[in-house]
Image: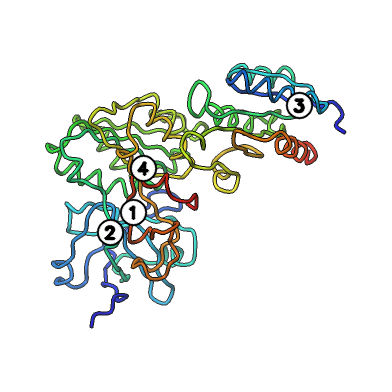
């Protein structure tokens, strides 16, 4: 009988420092057979373990269209992320997953897509952005609006530049007032205001939003004003997940488990849940 | 009893401003009002209120956040307590609170519309008492 808690062994192939406290790990399966068997979809998450320290939950930040590696991005906030931070290229970590549901990429085909993210909330969105960009002809207009508190807090800076250089999508990057540097050429303003300014069209469009709750709270009225239906506003939650398997009961909101029924939810589903997230 | 403190209400909802004005004046406060962030900032600078009641969604959806940021980053004005008020939960169902949102926004207290007069007065009393 297989042990459902037994992780794959992954080698850290590359470490990318995104900000002062946020890091991306590029991982490869130690076992080639594991790699061949493994698949996931954009939006799913996994449990990452540092042996002797514990596990923590992050989304898979890389795209399922690029299976040579798995990437995760994490902010250094506690015991396990501190331990993860101490690891080096060549070290081994545990990886359990993929878990949860995913962004409805197939349903999004033929539609215009608006990606909105704040801070490290770009990690799950990045997975689906690359997924969509790698199948570019299947989608309509693509708009990316991303913001962080300051220039130093922007993650995936190399990719933001790449996206901004692409002619077949529109990428707008903003920082909160006071977060700009003297050479900053992007927008200055809170994400909801920038969404209001960019005003992406809601016709035949789906929006994926991920970021701090306050960003989502104030972006929702903008999206509704722009005509996006509650069905077509999609987000992802990460709260309190531990086992990833619907067994520990830590991530429940009302009668749903974020790890099993989510982490991807439509706004029409979320608004009917208790306000625990 | 307060010693005739001055409270500035920055909100584009004229009806709400009048309701709050009535409540505050009945309780001994002097009330000033501004209908947008720019006018509000000017009144803060020229009239130096003891407390500001600040709406979030005005001309833009985050105008109140910008006003709050400017005030809290002005060494001469940053000590004026800000009570941030919003109706966002009526629009979205998401609650707004100091516990959940306080890390991101420079304000001293948060409350959702509609607010009961006694709750508003209690929050104002705490903020002024803490000065």
| Disc ID at residue A86 | none
Q: Chain of mark 3?
A: B
Q: Secondary structure at mark 4?
A: helix
Work out how far the residue at label 4 is from the one at label 1, CA to CA, in angstroms. Answer: 36 Å
Mark 2 and mark 4 in contact? Answer it, CB < 8 Å. Answer: no
| Structural distance between the alpha carbons of marks 2 and 4 | 35 Å
Dots 1, 3 in contact, CB < 8 A: no
The reply to whether discs 2 and 1 touch (Cβ–Cβ < 8 Å) is: yes
Task: Indicate which disc residue B24 carries.
Answer: 3
Q: Nearer the viewer, mark 1 or mark 3?
A: 3
Residue A89: x %, y % from top left: 31, 65
Query: Alpha-carbon neighbours of circle 4 within 10 Å: few (<14), some, or many (≥20)?
Result: some
Instruction: Report how far apart the C-alphas of labels 2 and 1 lie in the structure.
Output: 8 Å
Q: Residue at x 19, y 54 (%)?
A: A64
Residue A26: numbered disc = 2
Q: Tag 2, which secondary structure?
A: strand
Q: Which subunit holds the residue at mark 1?
A: A
Q: Nearer the viewer, mark 4 or mark 1?
A: 4
Instruction: State which mark lies toward you, 2 or 3.
Output: 3
In space, the residues marked 1 and 3 are separated at their CA atoms by: 54 Å
The answer to whether residue A1 is above or below residue B123 is below
Rendered location of residue A15, percent (x, y): 32, 58
Question: Residue A60 versus residue A149: which sits nearer the camera?
Answer: A60
Residue under label 1: A16
Q: Determine crowd level at label 3: few under 14, some 14-19, many 20+ residues with C-alpha closer than 10 A.
A: some
The residue shown at (38%, 58%) is A258
Which residue is label 4 attached to?
A: A268
User: Which badge, 4 or 1, is on the more N-terminal residue?
Assistant: 1
| Near-viewer residue (A144 or B85) | B85
């Amino acid at each position: 009988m297989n042990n459902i808690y037994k992780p794959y062994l992954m080698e850290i192939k590359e470490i990318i420092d995104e900000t002062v406290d946020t890091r991306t790990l590029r991982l490869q399966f130690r076992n080639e057979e594991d790699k061949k068997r493994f698949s996931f979809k954009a939006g799913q998450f996994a449990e990452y373990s540092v042996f002797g320290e514990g596990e923590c939950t992050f989304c898979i930040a890389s795209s399922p269209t690029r299976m040579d590696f798995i990437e995760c991005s994490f902010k250094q906030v506690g015991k396990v992320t501190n331990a993860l931070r101490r690891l080096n290229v060549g070290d081994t970590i545990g990886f359990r997953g993929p878990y949860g549901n995913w962004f409805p990429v197939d349903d999004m085909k033929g539609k215009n897509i608006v990606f909105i993210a704040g801070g490290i909330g770009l990690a799950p969105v990045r997975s689906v952005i690359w997924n969509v960009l790698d199948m570019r002809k299947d989608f309509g207009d693509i708009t990316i609006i991303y913001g962080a508190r300051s220039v130093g807090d922007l993650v995936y800076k190399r990719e933001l530049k790449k996206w901004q250089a692409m002619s077949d999508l529109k990428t707008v990057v903003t920082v909160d007032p006071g977060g700009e540097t003297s050479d900053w050429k992007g927008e200055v303003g809170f994400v909801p205001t920038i969404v209001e300014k960019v005003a992406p069209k809601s016709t035949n469009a789906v929006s994926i939003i991920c970021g701090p709750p306050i960003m989502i709270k104030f972006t929702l009225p903008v999206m509704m004003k722009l005509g996006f239906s509650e069905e077509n506003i999609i987000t992802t939650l990460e709260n309190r997940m531990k086992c990833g398997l619907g067994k520990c009961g830590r991530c429940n909101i009302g009668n749903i488990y974020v790890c099993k029924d989510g982490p991807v939810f439509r706004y029409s589903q979320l608004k009917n849940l208790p306000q625990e997230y | 009893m307060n010693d005739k403190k001055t409270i500035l209400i920055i909100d584009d909802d004229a009806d709400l401003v009048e309701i709050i004005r009535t409540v505050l004046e009945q309780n001994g406060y002097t009330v000033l009002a501004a209908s947008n962030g720019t006018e509000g900032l000017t009144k803060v600078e020229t009239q130096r209120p003891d407390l500001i009641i600040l709406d979030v969604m005005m001309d833009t959806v985050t105008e109140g956040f910008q006003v709050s940021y400017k005030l809290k980053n002005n060494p001469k004005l940053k000590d004026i307590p800000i009570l941030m008020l919003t109706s966002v939960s009526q629009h979205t169902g998401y609650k707004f609170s100091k516990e959940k949102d306080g890390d991101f926004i420079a304000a001293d207290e948060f409350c959702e519309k509609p607010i009961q007069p006694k709750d508003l007065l209690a929050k104002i009393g705490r903020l002024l008492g803490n000065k």
